[in-house]
Amino acid sequence: MSKVFISHSRTVAGKRLDPEYHYALASIRIESPYPCVKLLSLAYFKTGGTPSTINGEYWGGTLPWVSAKDFKEFRFEDSEDHITELAAEEATTYVVDKPALLMVSRSGILQHSLPVMVTYKRAAINQDIKAFFPDSRVSVDYLGAYFDLLGKRLLPLLCKSGATVQSINTNELMNLQVPVPPPDVQRQLVAELDAAYAAKRAADENATKLLATIDDMVLKELGIAKLPKPDTSLSSRIFTVPAKEVANTTLAPDHYFDSIDFSKAKYPCERFVERIDIDPPCGLEQITKLVPMESVSAEWCAIESIEDISPDATQGYSTFRGGDVIWARITPCMENGKSAVVEAEPSECFCGSTEFLVFRPKDDKVNPYYLQSLLHLKRFREVAAHHFTGTSGHQRVTADFFKSISIPIPPRSVQDRIASTASSIRAKARKLKADAASALDAAKRNIEKQIVDGGLSAVARFPKGC
């Protein structure tokens, strides 16, 4: 009910008929001890474009080409895609060749955040990115810091919903009043923000290193100093394969040469299919819970969210129950390590993407968490990738791969220890990242208070006449 309000007709005339916008217009106030100047007076902007994707001479060069997926840090380092200098000269794009603030101006992410980053590197941008070039009154670092700190709160004023995706209203953005502190204050605020990001980055790196120790721990427990890689000498790579094994599969040599070998483990190995059921039936007719592929975390090996689904809409999904291991078989999810144990009672059933392979131990001699740790090994996933089938972009591992391998089966006590240690390591890494994120948020709030006197109003304060 707090968003039920009356707005005078003169405040609506000639503007957007968007309730969220007018609520934000009436309720959000920025009060700063520093003079405020419209963005259009402080900076100009340029928008980019996308070179033709069918022209091979435009792609694969050294010039970064920035799109929304590259907004990961406050300061730009590199992009996933690169174009050639020929594309920069001939194609529709824009090359940023001096310090600039980059902002995502069209993307679904604008539903909840306003991604920005500062670049001092030469780069091209696509049509969904705006590059801002401020004058001498504000540094590009400070302008970036301002939108990084306050962008999420300003979104209701700036964002508009299109037919398919959200975008920034350029007129509202350029008329936005930006506080302009003295240069020394700008430098101090940016230095504090950089330090906060550096602290989070260091914590994240430590967490990543901690997670990387899980593989070594698993192999050490199995008595394998290092999972052996195949001999790559020329003589060893000349081999024969029966024609019946090649028919209807692939002619890629690595598919037949590269295999997973746990024979050096100190525990006996058994054929995978003798210990594990692959894609077993769920055993429950009515299913009301859905696990989408995106809800499975490759980093934490856990199901992060579960959605409700009508029992009538579950046809065509894979099914699994509590205690099963779900393992993403399609690229790039498989290489990234998307897999998890379904943490629920065996009587609870779920449905999910058909790109999950489902594994269920035949008895309690195999701990599903141990099995998941084994299948999550980086070396295991590398080998599995050589057994992809299907067309480019839709390649996947089939159940046949698992029918051809053997896995070590230690005593249950050893499996339990492996599973417990892996869980403990992930918990420590997760806490590291969570604490770092909380510290960054706290630092941002503190820096924001230095820019905005009293912050943004959280309570609607209506202009006179409303």
Image: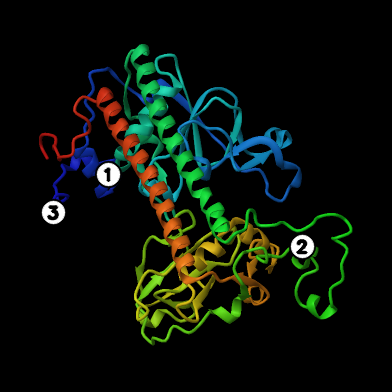
If you read the primary sequence from the N terminus, does the residue marked by circle 1 or circle 3 appear first? 3
> Residue beneath label 2, please?
254
For badge 1, the amino acid type reads Tyr
Q: Residue at x 37, y 62 (%)?
A: 305
The earlier-in-sequence mark between 2 and 1 is 1
At horizontal 23% and vertical 22% (from top left) the residue drawn is: 32
The picture quadrant where one finds residue 336 is: bottom right
**Mark 3 surroundings: few (<14), some (14-19) or many (≥20) residues within 10 A:** few
Residue at the (32%, 32%) spot, across then down: 444
The three-letter code of the residue at mark 2 reads: Asp
**Residue 414 shows up from this direction:** yes
Q: Secondary structure at mark 2?
A: helix
What separation in Å lies between label 1 and label 3 (alpha carbons)?
A: 17 Å
Kind of element beneath mark 3 = loop
The residue where tag 1 is placed is 21
Q: Which mark is residue 1?
A: 3
* Image marks 3 and 2: residues in contact by CB distance under 8 Å: no
Gap between marks 2 and 1 measured at Cα: 57 Å
